[in-house]
Amino acid sequence: MIRILDEQALEKGAWSENFLTLVENTFSEDGNLIKELGFEYRAEQGAMAMSVAKSLLGDTHLIVEAGTGVGKSLAYLIPAILFARLTKRPCVVATNTISLQEQLLEKDVPAVRDLFSRSPGMNEYADFRCALLVGRANYLCSNRLSRALIGQSDLFENRQRDELQRISEWEQSGPVEGIRQELSPTPMSAVWESVNADSSLCSSKSCQPENCHYRKARSLVDQADVIIVNHSLFFSLMGAGAGPEGEEDGILFPNDFVIFDEAHEMPDVASEHLGVSVSSWSLENFLRRLYNPKKGKGVLAKIARSNDLARIEEAKLAVEDFFQYLHMETLGDRDRVRIRHGHSLPMEIFPPFGKMLRTLVELSDLTEGEVTRLEIKDQAKRAQGYLSALSDVIEQKNKDHVYWIERTGSNNDILHLRSAPLQVAELLREELFGKGSSVVMTSATITRNGKADFFRNEIGVVASEEKVLKSPFDYPSSMNIRILSDAPNPMSGDRAPYLAFLSRSIHQLARSMEGGTLVLFTNYADLKYCYRELRNEWVKLGRSLYAQGEDLPRSELRKRMIEEGDALLLGAESFWKGFDAKGSCLSQVILTRLPFENPNHPLKEARSEYFESQKRNPFREITLPGAIMRFRQGVGRLIRSTTDCGDLIVLDSRILRQGYGKDFIAELPHNSIDRVTVEEIFGDSSELIDNDIDF
């Protein structure tokens, strides 16, 4: 059912016809995009825009695969904004990467506004409102900052006081949105937790849009026609029960509709954020914030009785003992272990943690000052959340979830207890696709063999339209594809020969290319090995070698690659997707291995077991489709504009030797592929072990 405030216009059907005409006129060969903004005509873009418009009109779901260069962001933004204004319904645009959010806010949304203001008959839509929604813990609360500055001697040590002053100076330095990411370097977590908006102290009663960054941002969101959010926050809010109350349609906001860009990430992000996660770092930091006996500081420093502080200390010791046991006895020398049975982990953490929670509740009732009372209530609420999460994992309360422990952190010293739903399809079918709102999903890589069946099954959407739009780029002319037919097997038991081949191949291929080279790995161990082996040689060449995880953030790595024009960049995981560098600075992409995910990950393992119990083949139905989608993402890093050209090199000969290899080859942008040997690429294969390459 189409929902609109102007029932008379609905009966006439005038507004819907006008809506489709506006979209069509915008994207036609002599349309407003070309006439007013001088954009290039793309038939695929117009086809996508009309599909989005019709989906919104019918409140139906739509899956669109739009190849690189189609211009999909404008193809969904323009009809979505027009529809939002005409129906007075909010549009939620969810992206997975910060870079795409920045593109939408800094480039695409201003372009749409400019288009509307210039185009006849569209001026009235140019004043549409757009807002960015981030989690409230990312916003600075001015009231909490003021209180922290007043009581800093009780809460913070010297270094933290300096950080508090830095945050204060930043806020006073000029107009800021008050988002943590604006401040560089990122503020210390312990200090930011004391001043952010994720607190009962930051409420509509005490904070107003005029003097609170979060309240101002929330006010803008409430009035917005377009709300931009990342996938993680979207699914976190959905999992927490955000959305309209009662029988009203909508997912996050009343009567909203949603567009997912980078939609291929939906299954993994939903799985991650619809489960449970609690870490040793967060628990220990929480207890230190309550009271740190070494510093004599904390929220409870002035108001707690001696027996209260003793309970905090008992809880702290119980947490340390619990995670030490997991570290030594459960994980041992492994980084990740699946918890197969409930009550198989120590239960001794619960009594002291429960006593501490009761202490916080008692203190909140006894404390007279409203500010302190609210602060303690917040801490009690957090303690209850931690206790519930621990109970969920240790008791395995949800039989449809998978539970595991893993190490994270730069020093591998943070332990996480995690859970994730075995299948997100059922949850999303009810909580996303069953809410009476249109959901549009788009990506450059969402199908396999032109069909989105795998994606549909992963996310649980049944009734939806499906459209595949090829990239307008001339791939046969712009991309040379070479596959090494005799590359060593990366799965060999003795990995030394393979790693030697890998590092020397990368060196030879990259140094022979005038522009920049991006090398994509499937694991950090191989990446780090090659980085160590290659860095001295690249210093001698006078060219830069960069690697993911070696000090510089992703954004800075991209910036340097573009500026230098001939760098070698080694990346893994996130670099297979969303890394965008146009021109000769990225003239070559090397895929070291076919990107199969680790089958031993607890979630993958449990899903495989489930499929086997259903007499289904987990490799063909889970592992292979996922690897092909990631492979397509990696291939897509090379050609990012109509003027780009370069070489794609695949160093994994399994693509030619194994039966499943043809499934990967079928997804390459064109079928003119050079199958070459090591000797053919390097001349004399002995060069790979020649003494002039000093490794």
Image: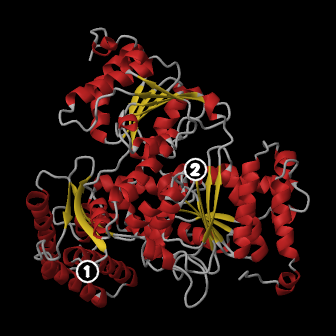
* In front of the other: 683 or 642: 683
Q: Where does the image place residue 188, in percent across and percent down from the top left?
A: 36, 55
Residue 246 in view here: yes
- Verify CB contact (< 8 Å) between mark 1 and mark 2: no
Q: Where does the image place residue 70, in percent across and percent down from the top left?
A: 68, 47
Which residue is depicted at the point 60% across and 34% down? 582
**Helix, strand or loop under label 2:** loop
Which residue is depicted at the point 23% across and 26% down? 497
Give residue 293's quadrant in the image: bottom left
* In front of the other: 187 or 669: 669
Mark 1 or 2: the one toward you: 2
Could you tell me which quadrant the N terminus lies in?
bottom right
* In front of the other: 200 or 39: 39
- Crowding at label 1, few (<14), some or many (≥20) Cα neighbours within 10 Å? few
Q: Identify the residue position indicated by label 2 in the image.
A: 444
Q: Where does the image place residue 131, in percent across and percent down from the top left?
A: 63, 64
Could you tell me which quadrant the C terminus lies in?
top left
Amino acid of disc 2: Ala
Q: Where does the image place residue 342, in percent across and percent down from the top left?
A: 17, 76
State the scheme by which the image is colored: secondary structure
Amino acid of disc 1: Lys
Give residue 229's quadrant in the image: bottom right
Which residue is depicted at the point 86% across and 57% down? 25
Q: Earlier in the sequence, mark 1 or mark 2?
A: 1
* In front of the other: 694 or 29: 29
Which residue is depicted at the point 53% across and 75% down? 432
Q: Which mark is residue 397?
A: 1
**Helix, strand or loop under label 1:** loop
Q: In the figure, is residue 419 to the left or right of 327?
A: right
In the image, residue 588 above or below residue 42: above
